[in-house]
Image (cartoon, grey):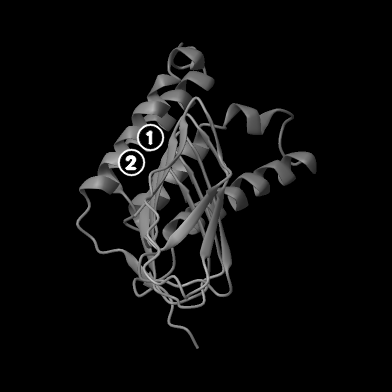
Amino acid sequence: MNPEDKRGPDKGPIIGAAVLIAAGTVLLVEKLGLLPPGFALHFWPSILILIGLVKIAVRAGRPTGAVLIGVGVFLQLSEMGILHVNFWDLWPIFIIVAGVAMLWQALSKESPALSMSPRADVVYIFGGGDRKINAKDFQRASLFAMFGGYKLDLRNADIAGNEAVVEASAIFGGGEIRVPENWVVSLQGAGIFGAYEDKTQHVQTDPSRPTKTLVVKGIAIFGGIEVKN
């Protein structure tokens, strides 16, 4: 059995799952007629508060969690008519939050999560993390970040067969993928108000060995994805 992440499960999916369960429960109760019509729409800022509380509880970026709680409370008071603030006057706050999350990730001294699994599926919402895969039969990875970022290190990995695929996307965030120099990168991603870049230098150290190709595809919206050696 392949050893999994030495630091335990990724906290991004835990946060996302908790938010989806809570939001879905409220919407279901409203649809069943147990809450007044439009109740959920008036309490949408509570989602930000919930995300912030979960992040603080699981220690997945306490400064970002505190910012989210503050923004959520501010917007919730506005929805309740206690404060009179237009949401569209405050949308740049979300860009600031994304910047805080990425800065916190960049300054973090924690070592990357190590995995020997040939597959990886990672989701980060208002957060980020590092993952290092050393599998010698790597096949695929799926990476997504919203208002956050991630790093994937494949420099000590090898591909099962001749081709592997990484689906890397980010919205208001970014990602960095590092690959061995003897891999060929086939970039099929797109940047919308952002960048999707291949900065690798291919060096075939052993011409007798078959060429290994890594296909990287996805989308970057108001952010960037970089592939490096």
The percent coordinates of residue 215 (x first, y second) are 56, 55
Q: Which amino acid does label 2 sit on?
A: Ala
User: In the depicted view, which residue is nearer to us: 194 or 22?
Assistant: 194
Q: Which residue is drawn at 58% across and 74% down?
A: 161
Residue 181 is drawn in which quadrant?
A: bottom left
Pointer 1 local density, CA inside 10 Å: few below 14, some 14–19, many at least 20: many
Q: Residue furthest front?
A: 207
Q: Residue at x 48, y 19 (%)?
A: 78
Q: Which residue lies furthest to the right in this view?
A: 32
Relative to 67, say whether 111 is above or below: below
Asked which secondary structure carries label 2, the reply is helix
Q: Tell me the quarter of the image containing the C terminus.
A: bottom left
The percent coordinates of residue 225 (x first, y second) are 44, 42
Q: Are marks 2 and 1 in contact (CB under 8 Å)?
A: yes
Relative to 157, say whether 55 is above or below: above
Q: What residue type is labelled 1?
A: Ala
- Residue under label 2: 101
Relative to 1, say whether 183 is above or below: above
- Residue under label 1: 98
The percent coordinates of residue 48 (x first, y second) are 47, 37
User: In the depicted view, which residue is nearer to us: 132 or 62?
Assistant: 132
Residue 128 seen anywhere in this rendered image of the structure: yes
